Amino acid sequence: MRVLILGCGRIGTGLVQRLSVSDHSVTVIDPAPKALARLPASFRGRKLVGDVLDRHVLAEAEIERQDALAAVMPSDDVNVVAARLARVVFHVPRVVARVYSPHTTEIYYRLGIQTVSTTSWGINRIAELLSYSELEPVASLGSGVDILDVAVPPLLVGRPISALSRPGEIQVAAISRGGKSFLPQLETLLEAGDLLHLIVLTSATDHLVAILRH
Amino acid sequence: MHIMIIGGGQVGSYLAGLLQEAGNRVTVVETRETQITAVQRTAPNTFFFLGDGTDPGVLEAAGIRTAAVVAAVTGADETNLVITSLARFAFDVQRVVARVNNPHNTWMFTPAMGVDVALNQADVMAQLIARAVG
């Protein structure tokens, strides 16, 4: 696949490295020669110094022959304009623009531009990490098995506890619901507001996190 | 007619004054609070809306849905192009006019980017001067 990357900052550099591994043909444009100098010596793609909205620079980068384009300059406006030009003027099939501003993703999608808001992503991820701190064990059953209390995540509401159980790894020991606790059966359905008391193999904690985030 | 101008610098304020004298209802959207006095001096009855014109929520709150014309006249070409795209394709504004700051960027100011009319100051001035000289 031929990929054009506009901007060689942290994200641009990281993208280049990530894509070079999978044998894509990568071209990078940045107005600052210093930025391009950050690319590793092993980079075999093309580097172009120039304005990412300059028609001649884009022509030199053969934008019309690219399969995909990522606009990752520091300015949201530059990225959105570059992405839209790539779509409607140069007919690049796959285009993604990085934006800082949250809340605009949907409106740009309607304009044919796929955006990734690193700000929203960061907020969600941090909130997620903060709210999963309850995965700290409540108690330990000797070495290697823990008891964890977890609020039922919205996506598991209405599903049987078998959606969460893993033989030999994760077991739902008890559920607290409406001020009372009981021992569930495999077909017991989870309800919003349930607090789950789990017995988990310490080595399966990551597995549990994956199921809860799902 | 309701006209919305995005960018309340020298160009935006002067334009607001002219359009208002011609009997239009004018809204100016500008990010710098300090520009409010400059706009009100040149165009006293203008509705000044503080906010970023590239934010669809700001455009909506400033009343873009009732605007017959939107003029994007900020000092940054990429900003003007984001505004024209939103005005045309997200808000269906009938007529969209934009200021081109750097003549090299003129190629981007097309209907595909929501622009009906692009005005390039440097080009207009150069042509007038050339005519005066010749």
Image (cartoon, rainbow, N blue to C red):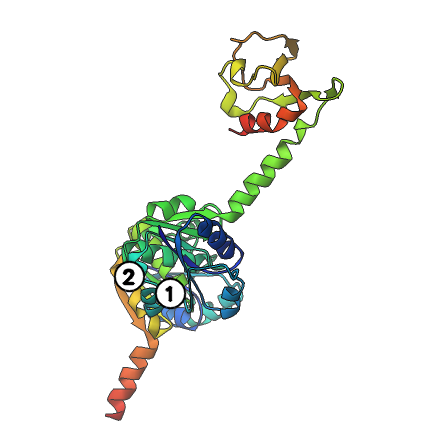
Give the answer, above or below, for where B74 lies relative to B59: below
Q: Residues within 10 Å of mark 2 (few under 14, many from 20)?
A: many
Q: Viewer-proximal residue, B55 or B64?
A: B55
Give residue A9's position: percent from left, percent from top: 52, 59
Q: Which residue is mark 1?
A: A53
Q: What is the number of callouts on the image?
A: 2
Residue A134, horizontal then vertical, whole percent: 67, 28
Q: Nearer the viewer, mark 2 or mark 1?
A: 1
Question: x, y (%) of residue A206?
Answer: 60, 29
- When asked about the image quadrant of residue B131, the answer is bottom left
Q: Is residue A200 visible?
A: yes
Q: Is residue B131 above or below residue A199?
A: below
Given contact means CB atoms under 8 Å apart, are the residues at marks 2 and 1 in contact? no
Q: Give the residue number, with chain letter if any, for mark 2.
A: B115
Q: Would you call the spot at circle 1 few (<14 residues within 10 Å), some (14-19), or many (20 or more)? A: some
Q: Is residue B113 left or right of residue A208?
A: left
SS at mark 2 in the image? loop
Q: Nearer the viewer, residue B84 or A130?
A: A130
Residue A123 occupies quadrant: top right
In the picture, measured across the screen, residue B46 lies left or right of residue A154, that is: left
**Disc 2 marks which amino acid?**
Val
User: Which residue lies most toward the bottom here?
Assistant: B133
Note whether A10 is above or below B122 in the view shown: above
Amino acid at pointer 1: Leu
- Measure the C-alpha gap from mark 2 to mark 1: 17 Å
Task: Tell me whether marks 2 and 1 sit on the same chain.
Answer: no
Q: Check the image and name the residue furthest to the right.
A: A142
Q: Chain of mark 2?
A: B
Residue B53 seen in render = no
Q: Chain of mark 1?
A: A
Residue drawn at x 52%, y 14% as measured from the top left = A162
| Residue visible at 74% across and 17% down in the picture | A141
